[in-house]
Amino acid sequence: MQPLTDSCDACTPGMDVMRSGHAACPGCGQAISMRLVLRAVGAKAIVVTVPSCVSVIAGPFPNAVADMPYYHAAFEVAAASAAGISNALKIQGKQDIPVLAFAGDGGTFDIGLQSLSGAADRNEDFIYVCFDNEGYMNTGIQVSSATPTHAWTGTTPTGNTRRKKQIMEIMAAHRIPYAATASIGFPEDLMQKV
């Protein structure tokens, strides 16, 4: 891994920092969205991932898909870990290093919601990206609270009977300064929102 300097081309937002050769399933939109988010912030970022499709895509050292620090945290603590890293950087006077937390809908809507809610309540300074593929896909397509009504999963073979949790309404209730939804179908919009 090369040391990051101010002259590093990949450190500039707009440069592609994600290499090819990731371990995403063929056709997976998360790899595209990850590439767009990382391009929007540049290689100076520190990334927190949790056990999910995201951590599979990111890959293990030394075969990671980007030359940037990745912190693989426990499933439920993406937001808490990102907040800790962000606060440590502030204490060190490193205000110019963005911190990203990448999690799937399971680690956001369900298992990690308490960590995310606490960080939002404290108005912690980091970017949180939820890759909502509407189920626990990394472990075999199980239902999550992001799964739409009537959708088939391995644990709802006759269709999900619950409504999808409205995570953006929950986040807005925390009165955070910014929240957005985005789609890889509109890449420029996604990058501008980051």
Image (cartoon, grey):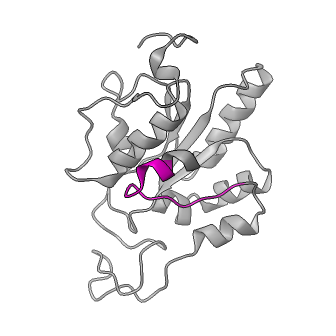
Q: Nearer the viewer, residue 168 or 53?
A: 168
Q: Give the camera-side residue of 167 and 72.
A: 167
Q: Position of residue 176 (x, y in %)?
A: 75, 57
Q: Is residue 11 above or below residue 160?
A: above
* Residue 51 higher or lower than 45, as above or below: below
- 63 relative to 180 in the view: left or right: left
**Viewed as shown, does residue 132 lie left or right of 32?**
right
- Residue at image position (37%, 37%) is 58
The residue at the far left in this view is 26
The percent position of residue 62, horizontal first and vertical second, equals 33, 21
* Magenta span: chief secondary structure: loop
Q: Quadrant of the C terminus?
A: top right
Q: Position of residue 104 (x, y in %)?
A: 45, 56
Q: Nearer the viewer, residue 130 or 48?
A: 130
* Residue drawn where x is 56% and y is 29% of the image: 45
Q: Quadrant of the N terminus?
A: top left
Question: What residue is drawn where x is 51% and y is 55%?
Answer: 130
Query: Where is residue 6, by image quadrant?
Result: top right
Q: Is residue 143 or residue 102 the one in the foreground?
A: 102
Q: Is residue 135 visible?
A: yes
For residue 137, above or below residue 95: below
Q: Which range is magenta?
A: 178-190
Q: Position of residue 159 (x, y in %)?
A: 32, 86
